[in-house]
Amino acid sequence: MSTAIKPKHIGRNISRIRELRDMKQEALAIALGVSQQSISNLEGSENVDDEKLSRIAEALGVTPEAIKNFSEDAVFNIIGNTYNDDSSSIKNYNCTFNPLDKLLETFEENKKLYQQLIQAEKEKVALLEKLLDKK
């Protein structure tokens, strides 16, 4: 069973980036020299031509690629990993991994090493038993 990848909705991405920049549709419309209704229609569009996308990206202060590749999950991940609470002695700046995942990876690695060590000990015991049997 194949799962189709949902195409990016460029208009929705433009809308979310505009909102994150705290910019109203009217302000973007003025920057682009179009009506507010044009921006509303644009944000409802699934696709936007490259030339128009470049102008919009410039007005929003981002790259066209940032609009195309915008991900709500990535934004929340960045926000969640860059909090700054000066009252706390714990700081977390741009953490790119989950520490719990790293801990579990370490446990798995240790488990494999212990299994290898046990196997080596079993082989050593078997060799010693074989040598004792010969005497």
Image (cartoon, rainbow, N blue to C red):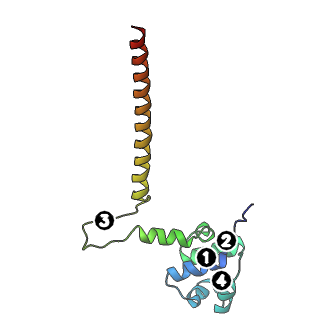
Q: Is disc 1 in contact with disc 2, using a CB cutoff of under 8 Å?
A: yes
Q: Which mark is residue 43?
A: 4
In the image as oriented, which residue stretches furthest toward the top? 135
Q: Where residue 134 appears, x then y in whole percent? A: 42, 9
Q: Where residue 11 appears, x then y in whole percent? A: 66, 79
Task: Tell me the kind of residue under disc 3.
Answer: Lys
Residue at 33 percent across and 71 percent down: it is 84
Q: Nearer the viewer, residue 23 or 73?
A: 73
Q: CA distance from mark 3 to mark 2?
A: 34 Å
Task: Tell me the kind of residue under disc 1.
Answer: Asn
Give the crowd class for mark 1: few <14, some 14-19, many >=20 residues within 10 Å.
many
Q: Which residue is mark 2?
A: 8
Give the quarter of the image for residue 93: bottom left
Q: Secondary structure at mark 4?
A: helix
Q: Of the residues under marks 4 and 1, which one precedes in the sequence?
A: 1
- For the image, the number of numbered tags is 4
Q: Between label 3 and label 1, give the one nearer the viewer.
A: 3
Q: Is residue 60 above or below residue 39?
A: above
